[in-house]
Amino acid sequence: MMRISLCNEVIRGLDFAAQCALAAGLGYDGLEVAPFTLDAEAPHLLPASRRAELRRAAAGEGIAITSLHWLLVAPAGLSITSGDPAIRARTLDVMERLVALTADLGGTLLVHGSPHQRSVEREGDAARAEEAMARAGEWAAQHGVTYCLEPLDSGQTNWVTTVAEAAAMVRRIGNPALRTMLDVCAAGNGEGDSVPALLERFVPSGDIAHVHLNDRNRQAPGQGKDHFGPVLSTLKRLGYAGFCAVEPFDYHPDGPTCAARAIGYLRALEETPA
């Protein structure tokens, strides 16, 4: 069966131990954690005792902390494109510490989306963003994790809006610890090719290390018009071994119910003959 994690902000109204218990009880294999749900001001500075507590909470429920995403929401004011030396130094410091946090929590991967913190507005912005990705790959390699640049559609950002763009950048940098991923919602709203076609192109090449499952209407799989059967069957046929994370933005009718409906829908698709 596909390894499926739940992005924890969907159920952030619960404390972390309860998030682990609910996700495990619903049949998820892991949690993908948004750092701002752990600390609204400075998640990158969580003390060692808290990191150990979070890891124990997940292990106690038999669930993994698989990954981190929404990396630059907190603290406020971060940017990988800013030419301000102070902002840049602060942003890179947070990124480096989040890589270490991922390793401490037992995770294996980080997803760099954070669209508002990567806007390209002036000359030099894109080069600074790419250099930040190169640095992130170096830190990821040091900690034995993978750092993924997430392509996001042009409605969210103006920097790296397709899987092809992200893959080209990853190849230029040439660090195996830096890869890209596919977000079904972003692909549905911004790519010319279908999601299965993108997977056919970029999974065998090794570019894609992670997948976000969400409908282009921003709800969970099964709550819109996107068909996820072909997505799962393509991943299976290609031998994809990574995690898929359920990442809706509109929790309908509420977070826990949304999470329950999504995993039920996806597991049923896995049992349906292609």
Image: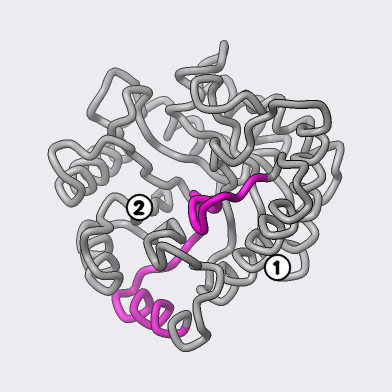
Side of 223 where 153 appears, left or right = right
Q: Going 46% across and 84% down the picture, which residue do you hit? A: 52
Report whether residue 274 is seen. Answer: no
Give whichever of 241, 88 is nearer the camera: 88
User: Which quadrant holds residue 261?
Assistant: top left
Residue assigned mark 2: 6
Report whether residue 131 is seen. Answer: yes
User: Which quadrant holds residue 130?
Assistant: top right
Side of 140 where 249 appears, left or right = left
Circle 2 sits in a helix, a strand or a loop, which is it? strand
Q: Residues within 10 Å of mark 2 (few under 14, many from 20)?
A: many
Q: Amino acid at mark 2?
A: Leu
Give whichever of 242, 239 is nearer the camera: 242
Q: Amino acid at mark 1?
A: Gly
* Among the two numbered marks 1 and 2 on one chain, the one whose residue lies closer to the N terminus: 2
Q: Going 40% across and 37% down the picture, which residue do you hit? A: 213
Q: Which mark is residue 66?
A: none
Tell me the quadrant of the picture where the C terminus can be found: top left
Residue assigned mark 1: 144
Side of 173 where 187 appears, left or right = left
